[in-house]
Amino acid sequence: MKTLTKELPATSRKQKLKKLLFSPKLAPYTFVLPFILAFVIFFVYPIISTITMSFQNINIATSEYVGLENYSKLDNPKFYAALSNSARFTFWTIVILIPFPLITAVFLNSKLTYLKNLFKSALFLPALTSVVVGGIIFRIIFSDMEEGFLNSLIMSIGIPAQEWKMQSNTAMLLMVLLASWRWMGVNILYFLAGLQSIPKEIYESAEIDGANAFQKFIKITLPFLKPVSIYVLTVTIYSGFSMFTESYVFWRNGSPNDIGLTIVGYLFDEGFSYGNLGMGSAIGMTLLAIVLIVNLIQLKFFGLFRKED
Amino acid sequence: MKNKNRISSLFIFTYFIIVCGIALFPFFAIIMAGFKPTADLMRYGVDLSIKLDQFTLDNFKTLFSTRTGEVYFHWYKNSLIISFFYTCFSLLFSSLVGYGFGVYDFKGKNSLFVLVLIVMMLPVEILILPLYKMIISVGLIDTFTGVIAPFAVAPIAIFFFRQFAAGLPRELMDAGRIDGCSEYGLYFRIMMPLMLPAFGAMAILQGMRSWNDLLWPLIVLRTDLNFTLPIGLTALISPYEDNLDVLISGSIMTIVPMILLFLFFQRYFVAGLTAGGIKG
């Protein structure tokens, strides 16, 4: 009996703790705890650390504060090549990866389309391939040899064979094509998901009012797709400026005249190939600034994510 | 009207035949290349005509019998392990977090969710240098844990799970509570099974992402035998293309698990994206 009364306060404290932990009040925080932890450890801390590093000159054992030196060193042709390549790449992927998937998704959603599932799967198949495998396939198709597939094709219609990976414009073409080929299916699915959440009644009442297909597309489909489009645009901008693999798979050890160099490629070179973490961080901060500014402008322009449904 | 529909239908059908032709052509190209003698590829580039008398399994035989091939299967195993654990962890963590955001109202919820959106919209590439330093200092360089841990809580998956969970009937939670179920029991016993379509869709997305990821594994993994497939395959690309046999047959084999994954979860895919969808 004595021991029991002694134990009682302890168990009740334990139970209280358990009750608190299991209470609907605290439970939500335990659910989101993984994010909070990951956010602090793998996001906030690294960001602070990269900001600090960008003002430092870092060697194997030592680091010294050098102010804005790393940033001023960015004023060089290589960095501008990287900037312009990433910007051009982003521009072209936006031009290709928004309108085409949108139209294709509208067709896929139409009741006039046969074999929908087959087409949907076929278009999604490239997304399952890695950029690396895609790049290897593209290297085969766009072989520099005169006997290579595309070269022999264009030569047969009188265009001279091209050294695809060696010229600035064709290099950009290769990267944009590879990215577009892989991402098309993903964006189609995003748009398709958006289309399927549009209530059918709206179309029906528009039909009763005598709207034609084009009017329905402009007046109903496009406005309803706005949130998806903003999302897709944001992701395209983000992945455009942070593109690395498409370039790496074509020119692992550097492209001629940096025609394939991207911002992340430059960051990778400085940070890992030359061990220059300070400079790499400065490049990273510049990338961050670019993506932030571009995305803020586009979000301001097209409207923000709604916080609630 | 009927005629008009038939013409539109035919137009759309032609459109899809062309677009799918373009999307599938690279697969056709690599499969053709895979069953041709590599000596021909080196000499003539890829000729895509079908010549049955040239058909050969040599490339695949090389893959299964040589030293390079042996290393290749190490990479294959590594990729499978990393992708499996990455996908499981990211689904578990992201679904918990997304569920928390989706079904509960709590103090600080909106500001926390804005943080998720911010992480989602910022390039992770800017974090690779500090993360690299961190991974070195905790001794996780060249380990699979080092590859998986930093990105195991995936904001994009949180976002989808949250959208999906927000659409779940909350009456079920109340019913469960009356029956004496704890909040965590509610998640594991009642709500998680209802979120299966979201799990299916995210399994495809996250599986794809980890299987195909190059940059972060390239930084963390140092020794040949620890490489994943994307790192290994790019290492095989040489200016002289002298690994073409392994490179091509290896690339074909690399696509297979993703296709299986897709076929397995396919029926959940668009459904999961739609219901969870990007409502706004």
Image: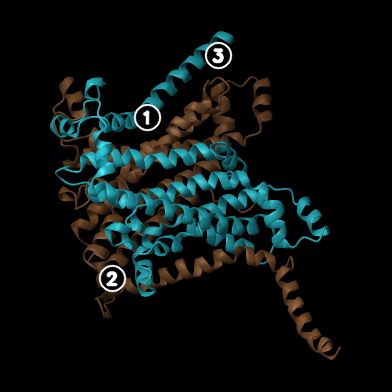
Figure check: A118 above or below B133? above
* Figure chain in cyan: B
**What residue lies at 52% left-to-right and 54% top-to-bottom?**
B88
Q: Identify residue type, mark 2.
A: Gly
Residue labelled with disc 2: A278
Badge 3 density bin: few <14, some 14–19, many ≥20, Cα 10 Å: few
In the rendered structure, find residue A36 and report the number of the disc placed on it.
none
Q: CA distance from mark 1 to mark 2?
A: 44 Å
Q: Which one is closest to the eye, mark 1 or mark 2?
A: 1
- For the residue labelled by badge 1, is the local secondary structure a helix, a strand or a loop? helix
- Position of the N terminus of chain A, as image quadrant, is bottom right
Image coords of residue A278 (percent x, y): 28, 70
Residue labelled with disc 1: B24
Q: Mark 3 and mark 2 in contact (Cβ < 8 Å)?
A: no
Colour chosen for chain A = brown
Badge 1 density bin: few <14, some 14–19, many ≥20, Cα 10 Å: some
Q: Identify residue type, mark 1.
A: Leu
- Asked whether the viewer can see residue A306, the reply is no
Residue labelled with disc 3: B5
Q: Which one is closest to the eye, mark 1 or mark 3?
A: 1
Image coords of residue A306 (percent x, y): 60, 51
- For the residue labelled by badge 3, is the local secondary structure a helix, a strand or a loop? helix
Q: Nearer the viewer, residue A131 or B143?
A: B143
